[in-house]
Image: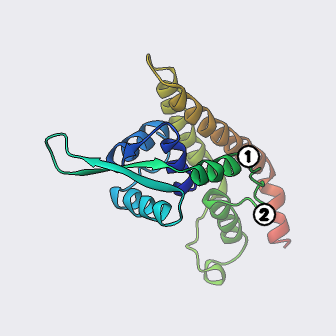
């Protein structure tokens, strides 16, 4: 995710302070890693430097002085272009689950000393345990999105994560069914 573009999107709603932008980011993107305040202010400084945002004044509201930022016409143009860009699907999809299953298959097909992995690796057992972890997370996300008062951003974020977890589960099911064949391909003896 582009922090630069996310902050421009949040500024599209009107002028805002860095603190408010961070809070709104964390509310609107609940499944994303929360932004650090330093990242927000560094990104805002870059947006100002690049002419995509500008300082719209300062206020203190009885506390420390806070800088108010707003998007410029160039910032709006940048945001519009970014939002319209088609994100290309990843050419190669791999993740840690895939890597662990492949390494476990390799470990079961040959001597542990040849693979550098401890003997006893069991890809089927790993897939069962990983499936259980995925199912737990799916139940958590379903509870979040169906909670009374769940806002649209929370529901959309949970749906996105649930669909990815579901795809992982389908891959795990297919892979578990193929384990005998895959192990034989790695170690044909």
Q: Secondary structure at mark 1?
A: helix
How packed is label 1: few (under 14 Cα within 10 Å), some, or many (20 or more)? few
The percent coordinates of residue 19 (x first, y second) are 32, 47
The disc label shown at residue 183, or none: 2
Left or right of residue 187, residue 66 in this image: left
Q: Is residue 128 left or right of residue 19?
A: right
Q: Is residue 30 above or below residue 34?
A: above
Would you say the residues marked 2 and 1 are in contact, meaning their CB atoms lie under 8 Å apart? no
Q: Residue furthest left?
A: 62
Give coordinates of residue 57: x percent, y percent: 33, 49
Of residues 87 and 95, which is closer to you in this image?
87
Please tell me how crowded label 2 is: few (under 14), some (14-19), or many (20+) other residues with Cα within 10 Å. Answer: some
Image coordinates of residue 34 in percent, x first then y, are 41, 49
Q: Which residue is mark 1?
A: 84
Pick whichever, 7 or 37, lies toward us: 7
Percent of width and height locating residue 11 = 48, 44
Residue drawn at (78%, 46%) of the image: 174
Q: Earlier in the sequence, mark 2 or mark 1?
A: 1
Residue 79 vs 132, above or below: the answer is below
The residue shown at (56%, 36%) is 157
Residue beneath the point at 77% across and 62% down: 92
């Amino acid at each position: 995710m582009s922090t630069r573009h996310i902050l421009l999107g949040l500024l599209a709603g009107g002028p805002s302070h860095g603190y408010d932008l961070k809070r709104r980011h964390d509310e609107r993107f609940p499944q994303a890693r929360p932004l650090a305040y330093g990242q927000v202010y560094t990104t805002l400084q870059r947006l100002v430097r690049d002419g995509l945002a500008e300082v719209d004044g300062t206020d203190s509201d009885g506390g420390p002085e806070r800088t108010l930022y707003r998007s410029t016409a160039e910032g709006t143009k940048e945001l519009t272009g970014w939002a319209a860009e088609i994100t290309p699907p990843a050419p190669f999809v791999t993740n840690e689950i895939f890597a662990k299953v492949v390494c476990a298959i390799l470990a079961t097909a040959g001597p542990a000393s040849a693979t550098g992995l401890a003997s006893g690796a069991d890809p089927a057992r790993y897939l069962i345990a990983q499936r259980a972890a995925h199912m737990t997370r799916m139940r958590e996300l379903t509870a979040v999105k169906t909670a009374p008062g769940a806002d649209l951003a929370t529901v959309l974020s949970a749906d996105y994560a649930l669909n990815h977890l579901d795809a992982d589960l389908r891959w795990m099911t297919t892979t578990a069914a193929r384990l005998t064949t895959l192990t034989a391909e790695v170690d044909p003896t």
